[in-house]
């Protein structure tokens, strides 16, 4: 290349750089306008949907570009009492407890205190299930991806392994409780104490706990059945990794931010968390007695999270269902965007579908899977 050609090449590169740089503010402005549009739509549509589905109260948070940009409360804490839901209102997170617990587990893995692929029998002196050698196949990885072979919940005091651990997906709260016992053994602390020190305090989740706190008495929402009747509050005095988290939309958004911004864990650990471990059976969620006839091409399970791959986008998601409380979270690591929703009604997931899809700009296949 001669001298003149090289000079022209540099001029062209410089001009291209200036052009790209000049477009950056426009792109940023467009993203802000799109974000504002989504927020306006959610604020406009949510009250009508709540009325249509008979949901008394909702709290939502939106994460965009890695920051919580919107937290909003709708409706009332309990039917006929007219106390409004606020940003400080506490909801049962139900199974949204699981991704937070998974994050705490992966901290122990990074610290070398727990092996992701080490049999959990290595950490407990007493077998969690008597008389079944297949227990030795269960690892933290298998628990977090729901492949233990355990039912969702045991029948009274009896717990059975229904299929060889690792073979297939079957959603199991019992698996998470088993891993909880291991975490408590390793740390020498009750689960909520460990999670408070390792997750809640570092992430600023000041309104979150796996056991009931006295201040929740004044802050909590009340759950409602499908007829809109208020239900008795569940005030757990013992932590359950699978289901007992009480929190706010703002607090849970702080957790989602940490995942999207790769805070608190190594990038390689987040990649592990977001990697599909098993494809889901499109027709089955609790599959202890049912082998899949086919596997989904779009829905998977990672470490603590459901994963959706559709139209070139990859999303993390989880739902929560404690009967009279429902919840849903979805996020997209690439765009660092996400949404979390809590509802104090048995009908909350009916409401969640249009709101989550509106917030994320994509069909959420999990709702069809959950039926």
Image (cartoon, rainbow, N blue to C red):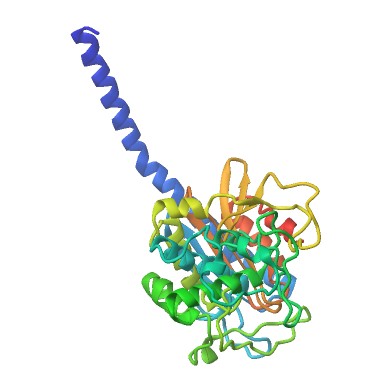
Identity of the residue drawn at 52% across and 69% down: 101
* x and y percentages locating residue 35 in the rendered image: 49, 55
* x and y percentages locating residue 279 in the rendered image: 67, 50
Left/right of residue 116 with respect to residue 143 in the rendered view? left
* x and y percentages locating residue 355 in the rendered image: 63, 61
* Number of numbered discs: 0
Identity of the residue drawn at 63% across and 64% down: 45
Q: Does residue 71 appear in this view? A: yes
Identity of the residue drawn at 68% across and 75% down: 130
Q: Quadrant of the N terminus?
A: top left
Q: Does residue 48 appear in this view? A: no
Identity of the residue drawn at 27% across and 17% down: 9
* x and y percentages locating residue 319 in the rendered image: 64, 65
The residue positioned farthest toward the left in the image shown = 3
Q: Quadrant of the C terminus?
A: bottom right
Quarter where residue 367 is shown: bottom right
Left/right of residue 234 with respect to residue 264 in the rendered view? right
Q: Is residue 266 above or below residue 347?
A: above
Left/right of residue 111 with respect to residue 116 in the rendered view? left
Left/right of residue 162 with respect to residue 125 in the rendered view? right
Q: Nearer the viewer, residue 127 or 190?
A: 127
Q: Is residue 6 above or below residue 93?
A: above
Q: Nearer the viewer, residue 66 or 129?
A: 129
Q: Nearer the viewer, residue 98 or 246?
A: 98
The residue positioned farthest toward the top in the image shown = 2
Q: Is residue 313 above or below residue 330?
A: above
């Amino acid at each position: 290349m001669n001298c003149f050609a090289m000079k022209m090449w540099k001029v062209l590169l410089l001009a291209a750089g200036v052009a790209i740089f000049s477009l950056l503010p426009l792109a940023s402005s467009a993203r802000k306008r799109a974000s504002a549009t989504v927020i306006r739509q959610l604020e406009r549509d949510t009250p009508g949907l709540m009325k249509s589905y008979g949901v008394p109260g909702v709290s939502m948070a939106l994460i965009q570009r890695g920051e919580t940009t919107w937290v909003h409360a709708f409706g009332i804490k309990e039917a006929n009492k007219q106390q409004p839901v606020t940003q400080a209102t506490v909801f049962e997170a139900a199974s949204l407890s699981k991704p937070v617990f998974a994050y705490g587990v992966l901290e122990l893995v990074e610290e070398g205190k727990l092996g992701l692929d080490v049999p959990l029998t290595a950490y407990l002196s007493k077998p969690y299930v008597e008389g079944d050698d297949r227990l030795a196949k269960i690892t933290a990885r298998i628990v977090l991806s729901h492949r233990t072979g355990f039912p969702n919940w045991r029948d009274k005091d009896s717990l059975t392994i229904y299929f060889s651990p690792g073979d297939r997906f079957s959603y199991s709260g019992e698996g998470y409780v088993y891993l909880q016992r291991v975490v408590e053994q390793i740390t020498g602390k009750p689960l909520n104490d460990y999670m408070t020190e390792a997750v809640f305090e570092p992430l600023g989740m000041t309104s979150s706990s796996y056991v009931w706190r006295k201040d929740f008495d004044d802050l909590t929402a009340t759950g409602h059945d499908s007829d809109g009747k208020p239900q008795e509050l569940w005030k757990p005095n013992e932590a359950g990794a699978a289901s007992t988290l009480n929190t706010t939309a703002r607090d849970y958004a702080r957790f989602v931010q940490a995942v999207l911004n790769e805070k608190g864990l190594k990038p390689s650990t987040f990649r592990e968390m977001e990697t599909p471990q098993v494809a889901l059976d499109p027709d089955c969620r609790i599959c202890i007695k049912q082998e899949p006839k086919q596997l989904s091409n779009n829905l998977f399970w990672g470490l603590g999270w459901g994963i959706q791959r559709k139209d070139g986008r990859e999303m993390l998601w989880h739902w929560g269902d404690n009967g009279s409380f429902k919840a849903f979270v979805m996020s997209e690591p690439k765009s660092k965007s996400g949404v979390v929703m809590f509802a104090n009604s048995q009908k909350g997931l009916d409401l969640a579908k249009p709101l989550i899809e509106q917030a994320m700009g994509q069909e959420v296949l999990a709702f069809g899977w959950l039926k």
